[in-house]
Structures are given as C-alpha cells and as structure tokens.
C-alpha cells in the first residue's frame, strides 16, 4: 500500500493541485480565493478572513508604494499558501512546517511568474503586514487587552503606515466577498486577476 500524498489538494471546482510535483499544471484562482475567504484570522475568533487581510495589505501597499509594482503584487498574494496550509500562528510554525510552506509558496510564485522580493521590499511587506494586524485588532476585538497585547508585540509603529493600513482596512470592510450563491464574488476574482496582469 502506497503512503498518502499530503501535498495533494483536490479543488472545489475540480482538478487537483499536487505540490509534490516539480511544477503546478494550473492554479484555479476562484478556488484559492474561496478558500482564503473562508479562513478567518486570529484563530477563527473574529469574522475577518485571510482574503480580506490580503486585499487590505495590497491596498495599503498601493497607497504607500504605488510605483513599486512587484511589492504590491506580493502584498496581494503573500498569504496564498494559507489556502492550503491554513492560517497557522507564526509562533507555532516548526521548521518542517516552514519548509513545506516555502515549497508551496515557491511553486505558486513560479506558476504566476512572480520574482522574489529584495531585502528592503521584503521588510516593507512585513511592516505593512504587522501594522495591518494592529489595525485589525483595534477594529475587530471588543476588549482593549487584545489591542494592547498586539501593540506590545508590534513595538514602535510608523504613523504613515498605520494611516494607510487603516484606510485600506475600512475600504475592504465595505466589499462583498461572496455572491448570493455563496461563491466568491466575481469582482474579487477580477481584482486579483487585474493585479496580476497590471503588476
């Protein structure tokens, strides 16, 4: 009896993404966005999805670094691995998990022809990501203790990034992620496709 392939994912609309292979044959955007839209952040304790977070980070990047097209694209897709590996807190990611996450990310980025970020741009991405986490905590948790805990973890904040993340967060709150049939809204799919085309 052969051992199971834990790197094989059967997609909602049909077909299989097999990350154990050297390259991907296809990458169904609708399915990936659907999964991210169903995966809530902060241990599924709040109604705010990885998809909403990703869009907000992308918008914040456009506000702050509008001419840095590679960085903006990375911001929109930086959590695509979580469509398959879920939203796992960084503090519990062991080396084996990080290795798998890196392999999955590399194959996704290869399929969408996304070059790696340089050191400075990677730092900008992480800075927006962590500022967005602080904004999300402020708006989505009822208790000030949660915000203070995350604020202590984040440390010094940059007002310009905080304002851009707040603006982006509020814009995304107004967007509909799913249509009346429960599928990912076509406008959201088109947003990501246009980002990949434009940038």
Image (cartoon, rainbow, N blue to C red):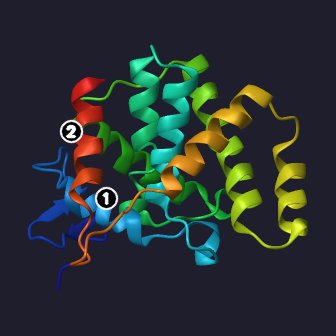
Residue identified by numbered label 1 = 33
Q: Return the residue found at the far bottom.
A: 1
Residue identified by numbered label 2 = 111
Secondary structure beneath dot 2 equals helix
Numbered tag placed on residue 49 in the rendering: none
Secondary structure beneath dot 1 equals helix
Q: In this view, does 147 lie to the left or right of 23?
A: right
Q: Quadrant of the N terminus?
A: bottom left
Identify which residue, 41 or 88, lies in the foreground.
41
Q: Alpha-carbon neighbours of circle 1 within 10 Å: few (<14), some, or many (≥20)? A: many
User: Which residue is located at x 42 percent, y 40 percent?
Assistant: 76
> Quarter-wise, where is residue 168 in the image?
top right
Q: Is residue 97 above or below residue 74?
A: below
Residue 46 position within the rendered picture, expressed as x and y whole percent measured from the top left: 62, 74
Q: In this view, does 26 lie to the left or right of 6?
A: left
Q: Alpha-carbon neighbours of circle 2 within 10 Å: few (<14), some, or many (≥20)? A: some
Q: In this view, does 61 lie to the left or right of 76?
A: right
């Amino acid at each position: 009896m052969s051992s199971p392939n834990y790197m094989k994912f059967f997609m909602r609309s049909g077909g299989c993404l097999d990350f154990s292979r050297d390259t991907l044959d296809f990458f169904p955007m609708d399915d990936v966005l659907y999964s991210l839209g169903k995966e809530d952040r902060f241990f599924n304790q709040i109604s705010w999805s990885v998809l909403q977070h990703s869009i907000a980070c992308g918008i914040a990047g456009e506000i702050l670094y509008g001419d840095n097209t590679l960085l903006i694209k990375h911001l929109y897709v930086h959590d695509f691995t979580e469509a398959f590996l879920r939203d796992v807190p960084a503090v519990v990611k062991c080396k084996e998990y990080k290795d798998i996450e890196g392999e999955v990310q590399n194959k996704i980025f290869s399929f969408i022809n996304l070059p790696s970020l340089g050191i400075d741009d990677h730092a900008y991405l992480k800075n927006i990501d962590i500022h967005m986490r602080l904004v999300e905590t402020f708006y989505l948790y009822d208790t000030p203790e949660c915000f203070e805990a995350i604020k202590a973890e984040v440390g010094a904040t940059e007002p310009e990034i905080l304002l851009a993340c707040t603006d982006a967060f509020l814009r995304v709150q107004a967007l509909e992620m799913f249509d009346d049939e429960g599928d990912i809204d076509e406008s959201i799919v088109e947003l990501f496709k246009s980002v990949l085309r434009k940038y």
